[in-house]
Image (cartoon, coloured by chain):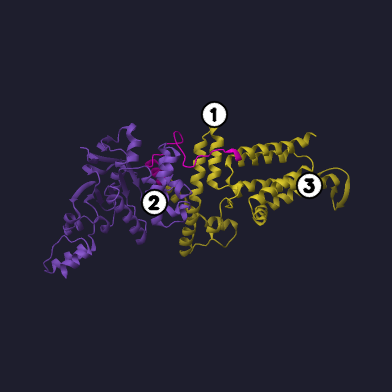
Chain colours: A yellow, B purple
Amino acid sequence: MLKDITIGQYFPGDSIIHKLDPRVKILIIALFITSLFFINSFYPYIFILLFISMVVKVASLPVKVILKGLKPLIFIILITFAINIFMTKGEVLFNIGPLTVTKEGLSTAVFMALRLIFLIVGTSLLTLTTSPIALTDGIEKLLSPFKKVGLPAHELAMMMTIALRFIPTLLEETDKIMKAQMARGADFESGNILNRAKNLVPLLVPLFINAFRRADELATAMEARCYRGGDHRTRLNDLKLDRKDIVIFTSMLVFFGLIISTRYM
Amino acid sequence: MNDVMIRLENVTYEYKSYIDDSILTAVNNVSLEVKKGEFLVILGHNGSGKSTMAKMMNGLILPTKGDIYVMGKNTKDEENIWEIRSKAGMVFQNPDNQLVATIVEEDVAFGPENLGIPPAEIRKRVDEALELVEMSEYKKHAPHLLSGGQKQRVAIAGILAMKPDCIIFDEPTAMLDPNGRLEVMNTIKKLNKEEGKTIILITHYMDEAVEADRIMVMSQGEIVLQGTPREVFSQVDRVKELGLDVPQVTELVYELRKEGIDIRNDVLNVEELVDILC
């Protein structure tokens, strides 16, 4: 059952967006997020929507997958909506019991909910079209200028890679230990929350011990393969910006620049 | 002098016990020469010091006393350590715990990447190494979806991509099913016979030891028995005394001889025995 969990929600494809340099994609999403927070009226949202639907179309992502990404956050969106609709002062539209709904409240609430939805959808576009490996490489490359001020960019990326590598292995192991303990009468599914948490102890203890053992062995194996940190290291697939990446990045820079400037018009 | 791959001179390894502070000896005054192109098998039951010795040959741990030379370079010398590790690669027991990356070819590239080799050359080496272990078709796969034998072959490819002259295998088949064991053993034999790599194989399985040029049996940190597979396994009583088994065929011959049937005592495989008996 644990095997069903998918990590990262990469949706493999062959589109121009999938092939775009991960650094460019990360930066575009950063621009996207920034511009979302600069928007202070409804009409620039049209362009945001346009941007999202264009990416979805070009990368041929199924809309269902994107909506599924919104599901876990629906609660947060609703709370934001409720707080905004009831807490904003202004021209009263109608009352529900002690709560008043104002015209300004309604518009802010819709505005905020849309902002959140766009935020989630926009960022999921990045993870949907970029494989975890490309994402890690991109982050490493983007952070590497900060190495000079002591940021361990390579180490961070290495940790992410190893984590991604071992998530399925550890899930499999959890499954195995769980079954072994269940075979010996352990109960993971009944009782109240406190009891259930307590019952997890015989699962977590072996899992942690094994994880530490694995870490130790992996470190030895890495040393045996001449690993000595990020200096002087080369890469099999080195990231290179080509003309396509630069053209797309520049046009997106202009696009989001214009969206941001609507605030000051 | 030039045909010696690894040389151990009076090597001792001591460590402190976790329980009390007593000094324990894992390897005791061992001297050994491994020739280039040789297929050496080290046998011994748990705690006989064989894994410790393997780790010392790779410079992962240093001997307390004595010296180890890999291609004439002392493992104690910090400057040599990376060259030694790329020339004497090491494959471990658990295939899961030695794969680093989330894609097979990225993992094979890990070693050469660490050596600072240019990307085009890495690509070439990765493809060659995967070809050699017959895993080319899986190069874009995620390692956790492979079988144990396939994972172990990927691990071997990861070592091969560093272009080593010698590969040390520390019980590479201990966690595999019979199929996986066969795959890995065939790969190891191929590397020795066709690629001329020096192989040091540490194992529990007697059937695997039969393939070697030379067998070394360790017990309590010392070499107690040495010779060709025929020489070693013909001494059935001595091998059993050391807590080890002999190959099934050898065992059968031993029992037959005990019953008074007069046949040679150095039979190693089924075909040979069939020839003798029929």
Whether residue A242 appears in magenta in the rendering, the answer is yes
Front: mark 2 or 3 = 2
Name the chain letter of the residue that bears numbered label 2. Answer: B
- Residue B233: percent from left, percent from top: 19, 57
- Residue B262: percent from left, percent from top: 11, 67
Label of residue B131 in the image: 2
Kindly identify the amino acid type of the residue bearing the numbered disc 3. Ala
Discs 1 and 3 lie in a common subunit: yes
* Identity of the residue drawn at 30% across and 43% down: B165
> Residue A62's image quarter?
bottom right
Q: Which residue is mark 3?
A: A109
Discs 1 and 2 lie in a common subunit: no
Label of residue B181 in the image: none
Residue A51 seen anywhere in this rendered image of the structure: yes
- Residue A144: percent from left, percent from top: 53, 34
| Marks 2 and 3 in Cβ contact (< 8 Å) | no
Q: Which residue is mark 1?
A: A149
Span highlighted in magenta in the image = A216-244
